Amino acid sequence: MKKILMILSVLMIVLVACKEQPKPEELEKTPTMEEALKQAQDPNDFTQNPLVGELVSMDLAAQGNNNPLSDVATANKMVKDGAFIVFKAGEAYYVVLNKNDYTYNVEPLAQLAGKKIALYGMVKNVSGVNFFLMEKAEEAK
Amino acid sequence: MKKTIAILSLIILFALGINAQEAVKKTLPQEPAEATKKTLTQEATKPVAQTQKSAKQTQFKADVTGQVISLSKLAMGGIPTVTKAEAEELVKKGQPLALKSNDQIYLVYNTKNAFDGKSLAKYAEVKNLGIAGEVRYINGFAVIFAKQIQPVE
């Protein structure tokens, strides 16, 4: 009889323990050193270290030519004709806007066509569109 | 002693019952989303007259519907839609317009493969602008090559 009582008591304890066990997502997260470093280095912040890339015309890309703009004259003509120019860095493409007033102004960038361009500013993604809020642009060293 | 065992057994059965109930709740399918509910009710209450569209409207089949937006306003994080006057002013200044459909942004190109934000200006403020054309994803951007643009009901 004592044995049965013992077994029943153990079963009850197990049941209570199972019910009160916190869910994994409820467990408090303790930030590791790696996470803390990641937070400190904002991946969207290019105010100190620039994002390096090239200019690509979306109009040419629509025609199947995804090569970066190779000369200033062509880039200027495309800007004048109202082509949509974006900035390519690695595999990502950005719509470049002025950081101060959020205007699209690629004319100064067109002067750097054919060169590796270093953009300083911040990256912002809105509704799946990558924006680069530019503070400064120069030829990459 | 027998009484004690009986009470303990009852408690265990009760606990098991609660656990089983919770498990059933978790596995039950969730209620349909609000959007689905709305469309279902809308379809059910749609008057017959509404479905009888004019010949012109039935010919036009929009591949994408949405509202004209400014990319600059979108980046600012506010409401990206623009008025007709704003849109015309933006086009004059060479600022790009696009189409926002749900949460997808479309760059609008004409059939000559040229960026055609200008064409959108006159449709600013249209709540449901339809564009018929091919949708392609180029360099991470959704691009629609517009064959026809017109407001839809």
Image: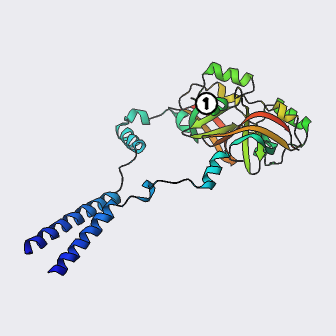
Residue B62 in view:
no
Q: Position of residue A59 (x, y in %)?
A: 77, 40
Figure disc tally: 1
Quarter where residue B111 is shown: top right
Circle 1 chain: B
Quarter where residue B151 is shown: top right
For image coordinates 52% across by 37% down, the residue present is B58
Q: In the figure, is residue B29 to the left or right of B14?
A: right
Amino acid type at mark 1:
Val
Q: Quadrant of the N terminus of chain A?
A: bottom left
The residue to which callout 1 is attached is: B68
Q: In the figure, is residue B110 to the left or right of A113?
A: left
Q: Nearest the camera: B67 or B26?
A: B26
Sort mark 1 into few (<14), some (14-19) or many (20+) by Cα contacts within 10 Å.
many
Q: Position of residue B138 (x, y in %)?
A: 71, 47
For image coordinates 70% across by 31% down, the residue present is B96
For image coordinates 46% across by 53% down, the residue present is A28
